[in-house]
Image (cartoon, rainbow, N blue to C red):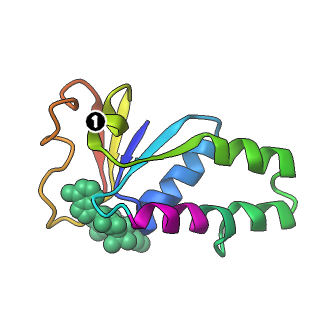
Amino acid sequence: MAIIGAGIMGSQIAQVIATAGCQVRLFDANPAQLPTAMDTIENGRFGLRRAVDCGKLTPDERRATLALIRPVTTMADAVGEAGLTVEAVPPSAANPAASSTKASAPRKMSTP
Ligand SMILES: NC(=O)c1ccc[n+]([C@@H]2O[C@H](COP(=O)([O-])OP(=O)(O)OC[C@H]3O[C@@H](n4cnc5c(N)ncnc54)[C@H](O)[C@@H]3O)[C@@H](O)[C@H]2O)c1
């Protein structure tokens, strides 16, 4: 799965999808957002470390979940092999996946 936009929604969608065992490629127009998103996923209030602390994940599951999330810096890397693309960008943003030459095949769900 490709997730376009690594803000609040995109990072949490990535976490949920990876926790379910699916590979995720996470892209943001602002590359500096990617490490922030990964830190939120790992260490945030609702992140994977807390899930371990609460007994919802084992440490091995935490590591495996993180390994399923790959931050990427180009749209093509995000959507190239994705079967599904989720856009988690502000409504004002230009339709990002549709502007990618690689994104004609994937199905797409946009946040409201
Ligand atoms: N946060 C919520 O609780 C919430 C709830 C329901 C719906 N939504 C909707 O989800 C969407 C995202 O919200 P959010 O809270 O995650 O916003 P956010 O501002 O936290 O994150 C948006 C991210 O999208 C990136 N972005 C913007 N344009 C882009 C583009 N063209 N290509 C790639 N990345 C791009 C930005 O750099 C930013 O990191 C919005 O439409 C919002 O209305 C949010």
Residue at image coords 12%, 57%: 94
* Location of residue 82 (image quadrant): top left
Residue at position x 50%, y 69% in the image: 36
* Numbered disc total: 1
Q: Is residue 88 magenta?
A: no
Secondary structure beneath dot 1 equals helix
User: Residue 87, percent across and down?
Assistant: 30, 50
Q: Is residue 112 visible?
A: no
Residue 67 appears in which quarter of the rendering?
Answer: top right
| Pick the front one: 68 or 32 | 32
Residue 37 painted magenta:
yes
Of residue 61 and residue 70, the one placed in the foreground of this image is: 70
Look at the magenta stretch and give its main secondary structure. helix
For the C terminus, the image quarter is bottom left
Q: Is residue 92 placed above or below 84 in the rendered structure?
A: below
Specify the farthest residue to the bottom: 45
Left or right, residue 60 beside residue 101: right
The kind of residue tagged 1 is: Ala
Pinpoint residue 30: horizontal percent, then vertical percent: 31, 64
Q: Is residue 107 left or right of residue 62?
A: left
- Which residue does the image show at 68% across and 69% down from the upper left? 43
In the image, residue 101 above or below residue 15: above
Please state the extent of the stretch shown in magenta in the rendering.
Answer: 32-40
Q: Name above or below for residue 109 compared with residue 6.
A: above
Give coordinates of residue 95: x percent, y percent: 14, 51
> Mark 1: few, some, or many residues within 10 Å (few <14, many ≥20)?
some
The answer to whether one can see residue 28 in this image is yes
Position above or below: 46 against 57: below
Q: Which residue does the image show at 28% across and 42% down from the upper left? A: 75
Q: Position of residue 9 (x, y in %)?
A: 43, 63
